[in-house]
């Protein structure tokens, strides 16, 4: 019992002794540290260790084995005529107890920077900041420098903006030789926003560095027109060169990977960037290379189903604008490209012969204004001459992988199809990964086209329907660039179906004509139906009516012939051909058909052929003979009847 009480008393005595020693040391340190003599000593020693001029606001003991230098200003040697200042809320010197006991305040075990604030000049790596932690040849360096909080600001004068690191946590420790090892975590803002880990080595005396930057979901500032978000990956910073490989990111919501390098060649940077879009199976790739020493840029865009485009040209900068002029696209189109790097607005204009296309857009938005002039564009075997505009808008600003949806509106200043001018074309459509849908366009008030185009991997398909109502055929002078009969009239209504393979679709037409006129041919109404592949369209169950008479249209329209109607025939109910590619006149009063034309020369001396029911015979009583009303006759000579 006495032994236990003795041990308890001894422990309490030792505890009181330690408390007394600590209090005495703290009082001693406080009196010693707050003296003006020690302040001058601390500024001198801190200046030696930091290799800079140091001004200390006040000094006080911190915890048990540390001295806190507060409101510190560190002035580093001048760079480019400007002083480099570091502001610190607190600079902590940590000592081993043995050093404190012996009063060796000039040999701290470590240094902690609390809330440092410093500015780094552009194009000048701050090697002077690392000389403290590195061992100079034949000298002594501090074992460890700790960073807690604060702000490091790197000025990018070309953009007029800063890269700012805040919430800094990490250490700089002495490495073998003259190197210092860096291991820092921070939060970036300014040009870049997000988390970053920086680790590697810096040799302040050899003026070299080898650092890795681990980006953690980093975005470009909203003021920087680069649409990459959530950058995650490693950047290698060695000397004046920066490289990166397979950095994950998102482009307008699409998963992507970006690789590249920035190489400084005697102040003339060379930039290479390659972007792959697609999480599992890439569906779009793009890349470019800029060599400012030669003022040359080249690149490509491979949009899978849409094809591959390559470009190159001379590049230069004028203020905030980058100009690519001249620009060569796919080795055929010549033009120019301008990019405003402050706003992100750009314009691409290219032309070839009589074709010209210009695109206005912004790097951060998926909205496009396309202006074009196309002369003699071949589409589905048709010759198109037009000039107009297309406005394309993204329905959503972000998409999932391989998904997108655009709404487009278009209008033309003029539209000529196979040399036949149409009224201005206006319409809209939607673009998705599966093709073009919701097509709806009009020519004036008489024609409307609807449908879609589907783009599977191998064989793109289309389905378009052209409808018309009460269209005056008298306005048509040509069809497929071929002249039509001089006198054509009637009201046309019906639809044209274009369906099948995009390269060679099947064309089906069903039309009604009222009060028709075709050359010298007049008729009350008609049904015209055909089905086939361009340029040959066989007629199917086509008829025309004149009074009670019915005639059948057979054969085909052949767009390869000068006389596209050469293969069209008119037949009677008995399938007797009474007309073939010639002008026809139907005489309503006489109820017959008259054919005439230059192709009748081989029938001379027959100048015309008339087809119709035989005139009614009168009986002796003066009444028509009913039994012979439907008889048909055939006469050759001045007129031909059957």
Image (cartoon, rainbow, N blue to C red):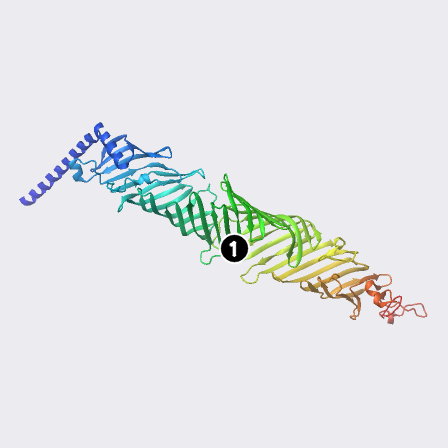
Whole-percent x and y of residue 257?
A: 44, 53
Where 414 sits versus 123, above or below? below
The reply to whether residue 85 is in sight is: no
Direction from residue 151 to residue 460 in the image, left or right: right
- Outermost residue to the bottom: 627
Choose between 221 and 630: the one closer to the eye. 221
> Viewer-proximal residue, 297 or 214?
297
Left/right of residue 119 with respect to residue 603 in the rendered view: left
Residue at coordinates 19% horizontally, 30% vertically from top-left? 32
Locate the C terminus and report the quarter of the image it occupies: bottom right
Q: Quadrant of residue 506?
A: bottom right
Residue 118 is left or right of residue 502, and the answer is left
So how many labels did they put on this image? 1
In the displayed orientation, state which residue is furthest to the left.
Answer: 2
x%, y% of residue 238? 36, 47
Front residue of 6 and 487: 487
- Residue 462, percent from left and from top: 60, 60
Q: Provide residue 539's location: percent of width, then percent of height.
A: 72, 65
Place residue 502 in its image quadrant: bottom right
Q: Which residue is mark 1?
A: 303
Q: Secondary structure at mark 1?
A: loop
For the N terminus, the quadrant is top left
Among all residues in the image, which is located at the extreme right? 620
Can the viewer see residue 41?
yes
Q: Residues within 10 Å of mark 1 (few under 14, many from 20)?
A: some
């Amino acid at each position: 019992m006495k032994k236990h009480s003795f041990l308890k008393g001894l422990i309490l005595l030792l505890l009181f002794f330690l408390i007394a020693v600590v209090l005495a040391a703290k009082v001693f340190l406080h009196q010693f540290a707050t003296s003006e003599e020690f302040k001058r000593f601390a500024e001198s020693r801190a200046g030696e260790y930091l290799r800079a001029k140091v001004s200390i606001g006040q000094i006080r003991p911190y915890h048990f084995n540390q001295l806190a230098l507060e409101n510190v200003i560190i002035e580093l040697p001048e760079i480019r005529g400007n002083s480099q200042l570091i502001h610190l809320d607190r600079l902590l010197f940590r000592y081993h107890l043995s050093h404190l006991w012996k009063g060796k305040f000039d040999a701290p075990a470590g240094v902690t920077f609390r809330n440092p604030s410093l500015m780094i000049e552009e194009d000048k790596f701050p090697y002077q900041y690392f000389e403290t932690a590195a061992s100079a040849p034949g000298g002594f360096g501090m074992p460890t420098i700790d960073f807690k909080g604060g702000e490091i600001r790197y000025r990018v004068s070309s953009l007029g903006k800063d890269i700012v690191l805040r919430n800094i946590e990490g250490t700089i420790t002495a490495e073998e030789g003259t190197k210092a090892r860096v291991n820092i975590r921070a939060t970036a803002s300014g040009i870049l926003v997000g988390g970053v880990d920086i680790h590697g080595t810096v040799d302040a005396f050899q003026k070299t560095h080898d650092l890795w930057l681990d980006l953690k979901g980093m975005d470009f500032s909203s003021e920087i027109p680069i649409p990459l978000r959530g950058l995650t990956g490693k950047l290698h910073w060695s000397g004046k060169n920066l490289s990166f490989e397979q950095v994950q990111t998102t482009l307008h919501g699409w998963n992507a990977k970006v690789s590249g390098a920035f190489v400084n060649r005697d102040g003339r940077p060379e930039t290479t960037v390659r972007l792959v879009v697609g999480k599992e199976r890439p569906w779009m790739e793009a890349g470019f290379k800029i060599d400012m020493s030669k003022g040359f840029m080249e690149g490509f865009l491979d949009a899978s189903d849409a094809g591959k485009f390559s470009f190159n040209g001379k590049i230069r900068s004028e203020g905030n604008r980058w100009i690519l002029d001249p620009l060569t696209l796919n080795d055929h189109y010549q033009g120019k490209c301008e990019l405003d790097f402050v706003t992100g607005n750009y314009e691409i204009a290219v032309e070839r012969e009589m074709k010209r296309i210009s695109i206005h857009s912004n790097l951060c938005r998926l909205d496009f204004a396309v202006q074009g002039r196309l002369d003699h564009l071949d589409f589905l075997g048709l010759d198109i001459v037009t000039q107009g505009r297309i406005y394309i808008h993204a329905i959503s600003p972000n998409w999932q992988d391989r998904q997108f949806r655009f709404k487009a509106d278009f209008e033309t200043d003029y539209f000529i199809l196979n040399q036949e001018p149409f009224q201005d074309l206006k319409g809209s459509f939607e673009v998705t990964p599966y093709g073009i849908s919701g097509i709806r366009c009009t020519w004036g008030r008489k024609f409307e086209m609807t449908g879609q185009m589907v783009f599977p991997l191998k064989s793109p398909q289309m389905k378009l329907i052209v409808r018309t109502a009460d269209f005056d055929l008298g306005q048509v002078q040509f069809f497929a660039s071929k002249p039509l009969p001089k006198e054509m009239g009637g009201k046309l209504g019906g639809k044209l179906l274009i369906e099948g393979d995009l390269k060679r679709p099947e064309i089906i037409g069903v039309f009604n004509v009222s009060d028709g006129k075709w050359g010298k041919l007049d008729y009350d109404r008609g049904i015209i139906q055909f089905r086939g592949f361009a340029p040959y369209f066989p007629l199917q169950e086509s008829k025309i009516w004149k009074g009670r008479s019915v005639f059948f249209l057979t054969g085909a329209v052949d767009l390869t012939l000068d006389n596209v109607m050469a293969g069209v025939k008119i037949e009677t109910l008995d399938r007797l051909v009474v007309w073939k590619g010639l002008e026809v006149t139907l005489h309503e009063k006489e109820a017959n058909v008259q054919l005439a034309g230059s192709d009748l020369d081989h029938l001379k001396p027959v100048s015309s052929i008339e087809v119709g029911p035989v005139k009614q015979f009168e009986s002796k009583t003066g009444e028509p003979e009913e039994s012979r009303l439907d008889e048909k006759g055939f006469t050759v000579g001045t007129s031909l009847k059957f």
